[in-house]
Image: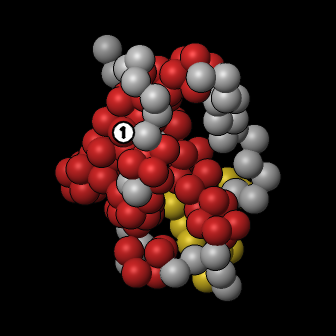
């Protein structure tokens, strides 16, 4: 059963950071954002899951999904997709990690199993898996 303390804990995870000279406040994904976020994430998860086959990994197909990642970050952060897409890679990475941090519960339940499958596929072909996004020191809780 969900208690008032559970609800308070979920809503008390806003993150504020400076990205490309703009102060950005992120909060956990809201219901209205779910369709856009899940629509953007689905091709990323599908591309990652395709690596589980015994066929050689199609890295170009996986890399081609970058636009979906931009869309997902824009939707999760409530920022314009053009602005997010124009960020330098380091700034985009900081924003991505902050979005993951503020939505840790959502991504843990929904995305972590898919990433685990991706890591297994990478290990099968002798490549290291992606690192954990936890411990981002660029995002400050407010």
Q: Position of residue 75 (x, y in %)?
A: 35, 62
Vertical placement of residue 134 versus 73, above or below: above
Quick check: can you spot residue 119? no
Q: Which residue is mark 1?
A: 47
Camera-nearest residue between 3 and 61:
61
Q: Quadrant of the N terminus?
A: top left
- Residue at the location (24% across, 50% down)? 39
Vertical placement of residue 95 versus 45, above or below: below
Quick check: can you spot residue 127? yes
Q: Position of residue 127 (x, y in %)?
A: 67, 29
- Residue at the location (66% across, 41% down)? 133
Q: From the viewer's perspective, tell me whether residue 75 is left or right of residue 26.
A: left
Q: Position of residue 93 (x, y in %)?
A: 63, 59
In the figure, residue 78 lies in which quadrant? bottom left
Q: From the viewer's perspective, tell me whether residue 52 is left or right of residue 102.
A: left
Q: Residues within 10 Å of mark 1 (few under 14, many from 20)?
A: many
Coloration of the structure image = secondary structure
Q: Position of residue 67 (x, y in %)?
A: 38, 63
Q: Secondary structure at mark 1?
A: helix
Vertical placement of residue 37 versus 90, above or below: above
Q: From the viewer's perspective, tell me whether residue 102 is left or right of residue 50.
A: right
Camera-nearest residue between 3 and 46:
46
């Amino acid at each position: 059963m969900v208690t008032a303390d559970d609800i308070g804990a979920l809503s008390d995870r806003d993150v504020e950071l400076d990205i490309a000279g703009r102060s950005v406040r992120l909060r956990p994904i809201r219901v209205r954002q779910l369709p856009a976020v899940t629509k953007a994430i689905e091709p990323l998860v599908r591309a990652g899951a395709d690596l589980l086959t015994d066929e050689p990994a199609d890295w170009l197909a996986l890399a081609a999904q970058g636009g979906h990642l931009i869309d997902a970050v824009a939707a999760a952060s409530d920022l314009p997709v053009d602005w997010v897409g124009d960020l330098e890679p380091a700034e985009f990475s900081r924003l991505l990690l902050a979005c993951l941090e503020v939505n840790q519960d959502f991504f843990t339940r929904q995305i972590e199993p898919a990433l685990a499958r991706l890591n297994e596929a990478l290990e099968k072909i002798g490549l290291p898996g992606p690192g954990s996004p936890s411990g981002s020191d660029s995002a400050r809780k407010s």
